[in-house]
Amino acid sequence: MSDEHEHEPTRTKVPMPVATLSDEHLGDAARHPSRVEALIALILVVAIVFTAGFGVAFTQNWNPWILGGTLGAGMFLLGFGLTAWGKYLMPQGPFVEERHVLASSPEERSAMSAALVERSAVVVKRRKLLGGLFAIGAGIFGIVAMFPLLRSLGPLPGTSLDRSNWRKGSLLVDSNGRAVEKGTLVVGGIMTVYPNKWEYTTYGEAVDQTVLIRVQDTDLVTAPGRETWAPAGYVAYSKLCTHLGCPVGLYEQQLELLVCPCHQSMFNVRNGAVPQFGPAPRPLPQLPLYFDAQGQLRAQDAYDQALGPGFYERTTTKVDGT
Amino acid sequence: MSTTLPTAKTKRQALGPYGRVGKVVDELDDRLGVAKGGRVFLDKIFPDHWSFMLGEIALYSFVVLMATGVFLALYFVPSTSQVIYHGTYAPLRGQRVSEAYESTVNISFAVRGGLLIRQMHHWAADIFVGSIVVHMARIFFTGAFRKPRELNWTIGTLMLILAILEGFIGYSLPDDLISGTGLRIGYSIVESIPFVGSYLGTFLWGGQFPGNGSIEPRFFIIHVLIIPLVITGLLGAHLGLLVRQKHTQFKGEGRTETNVVGSPMFPTFMAKTTGFLFMVAGATALLGAFAQINPIWQFGSYDPSKISYAVQPDWYMGWLDGALRIMPSWEFAGWGHTIPLEVLLPAVIFPGLIFNIAFLWPAIERRWTGDNELHNLLDRPRDRPKRTAAGAAMLGLLFTLFAASSTDVLANYFHVSLNFVLWAFRVLTVAVPIVVGFVTYGICREMQGVHGIGKRKRAVIVHRSALGAYSTVTADPRPGDGHEELDPEPVPVRIDVAPLTAAVPGADHESSPTGSRQVTR
């Protein structure tokens, strides 16, 4: 205990490359730091004020922009001060570090390859049956492991993609459940309709949504077989764009074009919603309409095809609406 | 005379020359052997070039994303169940909204600091993807991806894809009108894949769009756990490989294929990079405070039969949206099947192609040039005109498609027909990459031929004498002109602030010119 003084610790035990103040790696600022140090200190003081200000702003529940302004300015200046400290007052490069060859020696490589090849030659190649069986098992596992990962996520599509809730005789209603009568729309008017009882449901909104437009009766260019589909100028098209399924929500009344705001597909309302512009490949499916004895608009039948964008199983023939 | 009462001085001496720090190092080294490797790590050299900081922006915006994301996850409800809004935001009161949307509006208005954190999160996401892209461009144009760093290029590209996916899923979560429409488009793109598309769609969404409501919690867990976990793992590998293989560097005084020249990890780089973390976080907070982003309370909750006009996705999805817009309506239908090429080509095959080119580029270039050497020195872009031209052409293509995602806005703004804008972009999508590629190639060749290009010019002062004769004098050098690059030296262990204390004999310095570092590996 008494001889501690004879072991007066020194810092010369390890060889130390030492830079002195005259070292070129210290910039002018680091050699004469007083002004830079004062400036950085000032920046840090301002940073502290802002950061503390954030605490005050938070406890007082001030506006988000005051919260963000104080927090942002505080953090930014704190970082700026530290970076400036590092840049101006700490030793800068060029310092050098040697790279070490990552590659192993040829002997080590050979030893590695040899271990892989020679051991497997004895253990695996001689046991072809076991190896083969394990490979088959692992392969089957790989396939069946997908089942819970995928198959239990959701139902098979089946024919669900081809169908909607429109049926023969479905009553057209708006989102509040009101039926459509002859005077509901003036010529040039547009509304979104759903099959009765499916308005205000997620599925009805997503799949069954249909635009109902009243056009001048004489303007309609009717395809053969669709002569009776648009009584009194009321035409109904699926609102799902055939491109990517966005609702075709814009109606250019003057041009009588339905426009999809997503990718600007345009459909000619007078002419069976044939795509006139943009990436949509197919006309919007048309819903055949009629006025029932009470003067309310109903569907003559379901849509004659799948609604919305294309998919592999989509056929060009009619799928039963039920 | 042994005194039993230790004084402060004897305590200090008992700790050895390096005090408590030395003691901690001793104890740790006894157990883990950290001294050797730790010392190497402290001396690790980081090149001083500014372009090496681009990846740091990505790293630190990811840190901001994690921090703000944890906050948001405490309040967000991942459910599309419909509720009636009764919160503080008056225009929405009484409206039918989803729980996800309601909770996001509540984060914005009812949770203290919530709006700031939400906007910081969104801004940080945009900055995250942006800095990855710029960082990747730097790596590409300087040839930093070459052997031995191909694996790290692959990891980086993988992280870019994940970041884009994470961003898309992230902005889909609030279930507002715009993100819901984006999700609808996402479903249709999945559906367009032949053979498996319909199945994938109904599996993921739990039925035909909008499904049975399971997509929201699924996206939530993907967004807050799965993708961040994978990105964190890849990030660890990315940085681990960087430490193992060491940095690349530009050519310069004393810089060779077998060394790295720059500033040491401790303290210089550590101070600068920690400061930079705070600056990135601070800048994100300032953006979150003063630049509104994604004001979902204005859009309303998602209703599949409603739509807004002139909406674009977040910027990193723009190129795909643009590709979808300019694609002609080529749908294949026959033999009882439909293949929606107008969706499949631009939204599935095209991005697949682009990312595959990115993944394969190091191999493509190795094959093309037959260069299988290890490279640690970076190229100047002008010295590799073909690579630079290819990269510029790719950026030209992607930027043109990005611009094409606003055809409707451009047509409206410039009062030209949408048809004209559409066809202009179809032409530009082909023309811009070709023109940009050739022009870039030409500029590179041009720059190679000019001596001293890129160096700062010395000004010349022209004098006119009374007789009308002209003479020129070179101006005085400006600060930094003629600054000779220093010879690189090993990192000093100590900087003597008072140089004359001279506790260290100079012989120690000379006896070990590279410090004690070299003996460590």
Image: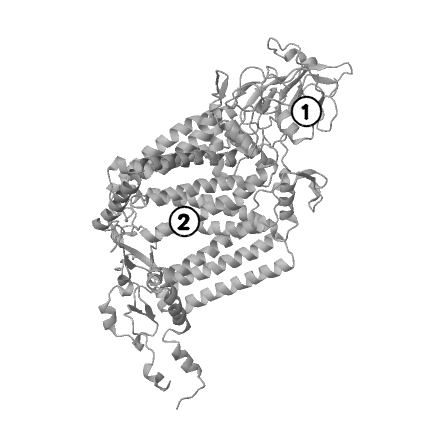
Parent chain of label 2: B
Q: Label 1 neighbourhood size at 10 Å, few (<14), some (14-19), many (20+)?
A: many
Labels 1 and 2 within one chain: no
Question: Which residue lies under the disc numbered 2?
Answer: B55
Q: Which residue is drawn at 47% across and 59% down?
A: A79
Q: If the image is split into quadrants, where does the N terminus of chain A sit?
A: bottom left
Q: What residue type is labelled 2?
A: Gly
Left or right: where does residue B162 sit relative to residue A96? right
Query: Nearer the viewer's eye, disc 1 or disc 2?
Result: 1
Callout 1: SS: strand
Residue A161 placement (x, y as % from top left): 57, 24
Vertical relation: A6 (above or below) B451: below
Vertical relation: B496 (above or below) B205: below
From where the camera sits, is residue B374 visible? no
Residue A18 placement (x, y as % from top left): 29, 69
Q: What residue type is labelled 1?
A: Tyr
* Quarter of the figure with residue B150: top left
Question: Which residue lies under the disc numbered 1?
Answer: A194
Task: Calculate the distance from the C-alpha at mark 1 to the C-alpha at mark 2.
Answer: 52 Å
Tell me, yes or no, whether the two marked residues, 1 and 2, touch with CB atoms within 8 Å: no
